[in-house]
Image: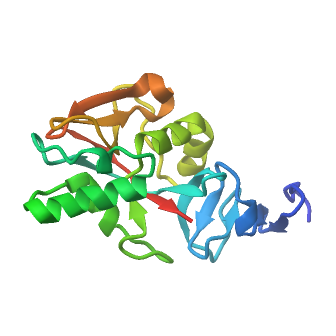
Amino acid sequence: APGAKECKSGEQTLYSSCATNLSNCEDGDILFSDKSCATGIIPGKTPIGIVFSSTSRLAVALDEKTLEWGGYGKEIGSAARGTSGKSNTAAILAYGRANNIKYPAAEYCNKYSITGTKTGDWFLASKGELKLLSDNFSEINTSLKVLGKAMSEDSNIYYWSSSEYTSDNAQRIVPRSGWGGMDKHGKAGSSRVRPVLAF
């Protein structure tokens, strides 16, 4: 077709986008509710996130909120300091239930669902997982912009990770700045929160 996109091997041209099956998702691709990926919008398919680590098979949600981390003054400990956001989030929620403490950032991610996913599928990324997003930030944000769901490029806007630092602080990042944009912040403070999905 005239003006059709030149697709990489293993992709099919679909509505001027390149569509791949699950095994061929690349960083910056749109992830759809059927867990297929493409470099652009495909009519009739529902975008649910943007792939930010094809190796670890992680995608970031299209939605975000500004929330407290929660539990200021309470130390969860090593269970909330691992490399997996999924297990950190589970540990935060378990601690919150056991001690009747609200953890708004982790609770929002855990409750988040969209077509093709259910409550409990999404989680609050660990600091290392946010670093992976940060490594490909411009590519990921370009795809988010196509969907009208861009993350902030402001160097003063932070996103929470699920990585606890101390009883009073948790770690957060400015996505476009990598490790240089990582800091620790009081759990009672508010930062942006965007759920992550392992697909």
Q: Residue at x 66, y 55 (%)?
A: 29
Q: Residue at x 12, y 42 (%)?
A: 72
As drawn, the residue found furthest toward the front would be: 78
Q: Is residue 172 above or below residue 93?
A: above
As drawn, the residue found furthest toward the top would be: 180
Q: From the viewer's side, name the closer residue of 82 and 175.
A: 82
Q: Is residue 76 above or below residue 117?
A: above
Residue 150, image x and y in percent?
Answer: 48, 46
Q: Is residue 128 above or below residue 95?
A: above
Quadrant housing residue 10: bottom right
Q: Is residue 199 above or below residue 71?
A: below
Quadrant housing residue 2: bottom right
Residue 5, image x and y in percent?
Answer: 84, 56
Horizontal placement of 138 versus 193: left or right? right
- Quarter the N terminus occupies: bottom right
Q: From the viewer's side, name the closer residue of 37 and 56.
A: 56
Q: From the viewer's side, name the closer residue of 180 and 74.
A: 74
Q: From the viewer's side, name the closer residue of 1 and 100.
A: 100
Residue 157, image x and y in percent?
Answer: 34, 32
Image colouring: rainbow
Horizontal placement of 75 versus 121: left or right? left
Horizontal placement of 75 versus 84: left or right? left
